[in-house]
């Protein structure tokens, strides 16, 4: 499957090669190595290079001969940052998604978001007008807000918590759209963490989806999405909002009385299972990259890896 995906992206890779200077790591090999890092929960590039040095199966998958030298971990990281971007990650994700033809529902979906802890400590979250050098200080009792404070380590991370009673952490929000037949990922994106980001990202993903679909679709979601602005906008897009109801919310009996509404709510676990995989097996429990652009490409790329694992199993079950 990876061979077919990379073959379809050959034109995209042509523009990444430089015509001058020393040859860089081939983007195809770079992506293959990063897939191994996600598949096998390799925690760092240094450890990945170590395993490539002695693991013959890893070498075979990446395309290295038995006596080829393995790259230096710093060179690998620099090539990754230079070659990989959000557009390339979305292209790779789209090619993987195309491999799932016949396995994905084109009518029923579920949307949700998850908190991605940023690679920044609490002491780096300092006042924006604080010019003192150092790594922060005693912030106990100080009212800290995103409007007045920012992290010196990762300025794009935001202090955020998803529910009352939780600890606020420097984070990003990852958003995922899952189809309800087999739980494959249909769309994904990352945003800065704030109270409206989940609904805004859901609207963007549903808008892109409705451009590809001809008929009406349904979108399940939890109570956080039960607001009048979100529900009305979703309906304008031609999407039926199967959102869990809350008191004085926007969902009424016109929607909840239909049998499909209860079915959509019963399928909401399909989006929670990938989140568990992403944080236990994948590398996004606490992301080791800084900046929204880098976190976004890693988030989308990890979902492509998740689909790559699921698709062969689903094909075997349906055979």
Image (spheres, rainbow, N blue to C red):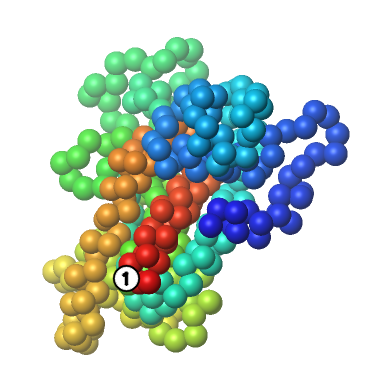
Apparent side of residue 168 relative to residue 136 in the rendered image (left or right):
left
The residue shown at (49%, 29%) is 55
> Quick one: 38 or 141, which is closer to the camera?
38
> Quick one: 60 or 14, which is closer to the camera?
60
When asked about the image quadrant of residue 135, the answer is top left
Image height check: is 112 above or below 157? below
Secondary-structure class at tag 1: loop
The residue shown at (53%, 77%) is 211
x, y percent for residue 238: 42, 82
The residue shown at (73%, 33%) is 24
Residue 223 appears in view: yes
> Quick one: 75 or 141, which is closer to the camera?
75
x, y percent for residue 175: 39, 55
Number of labels in the image equals 1
Image height check: is 312 above or below 147? below
Query: In the orientation shown, which residue stands out farthest toward the right?
Result: 20
Apparent side of residue 113 relative to residue 156 in the rendered image (left or right):
left
x, y percent for residue 204: 47, 65
Image height check: is 284 above or below 266? above
> Quick one: 317 or 101, which is closer to the camera?
317
When asked about the image quadrant of residue 283, the answer is top left
Image height check: is 85 above or below 229? above
Q: Which residue is mark 1?
A: 180
x, y percent for residue 141: 22, 24
Residue 148 appears in view: no
When asked about the image quadrant of residue 227, the answer is bottom left
State the quadrant of the C terminus: bottom left
Local crowd size for mark 1, using a 10 Å CA cut-off: few (<14), some (14–19), many (≥20): many
The residue shown at (48%, 77%) is 210
């Amino acid at each position: 499957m990876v061979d077919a995906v990379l073959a379809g992206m050959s034109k995209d890779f042509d523009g990444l090669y430089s015509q001058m200077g020393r040859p860089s790591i081939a983007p195809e090999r770079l992506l293959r190595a990063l897939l191994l890092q996600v598949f096998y929960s390799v925690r760092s590039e240094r450890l990945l290079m170590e395993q490539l040095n002695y693991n013959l199966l890893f070498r075979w998958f990446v395309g290295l001969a038995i006596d080829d030298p393995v790259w230096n971990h710093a060179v690998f990281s620099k090539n990754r940052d230079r070659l990989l971007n959000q557009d390339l990650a979305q292209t790779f994700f789209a090619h993987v998604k195309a491999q799932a033809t016949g396995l994905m529902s084109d009518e029923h979906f579920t949307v949700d978001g998850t908190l991605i802890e940023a690679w920044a400590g609490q002491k780096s979250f300092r006042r924006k007008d604080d010019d003192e050098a150092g790594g922060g200080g005693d912030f106990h009792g100080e009212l800290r807000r995103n409007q007045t404070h920012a992290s010196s380590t990762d300025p794009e991370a935001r202090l955020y918590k998803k529910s009352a009673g939780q600890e606020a952490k420097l984070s990003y929000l990852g958003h995922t759209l899952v189809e309800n037949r087999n739980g494959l990922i249909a769309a994904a994106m990352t945003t800065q963490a704030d109270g409206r980001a989940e609904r805004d990202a859901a609207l963007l993903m549903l808008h892109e989806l409705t451009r590809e679909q001809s008929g009406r679709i349904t979108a399940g979601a939890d109570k956080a999405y039960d607001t009048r602005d979100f529900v009305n906008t979703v309906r304008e897009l031609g999407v039926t909002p199967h959102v869990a109801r809350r008191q004085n919310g926007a969902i009424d009996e016109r929607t909840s009385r239909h049998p499909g509404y209860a079915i959509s709510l019963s399928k909401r676990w399909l989006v929670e299972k990938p989140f568990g995989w992403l944080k236990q097996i994948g590398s996004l429990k606490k992301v080791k990259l800084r900046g929204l652009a880098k976190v976004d490409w890693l988030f989308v790329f990890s979902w492509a890896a998740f689909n790559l694992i699921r698709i062969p199993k689903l094909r075997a079950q349906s055979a």
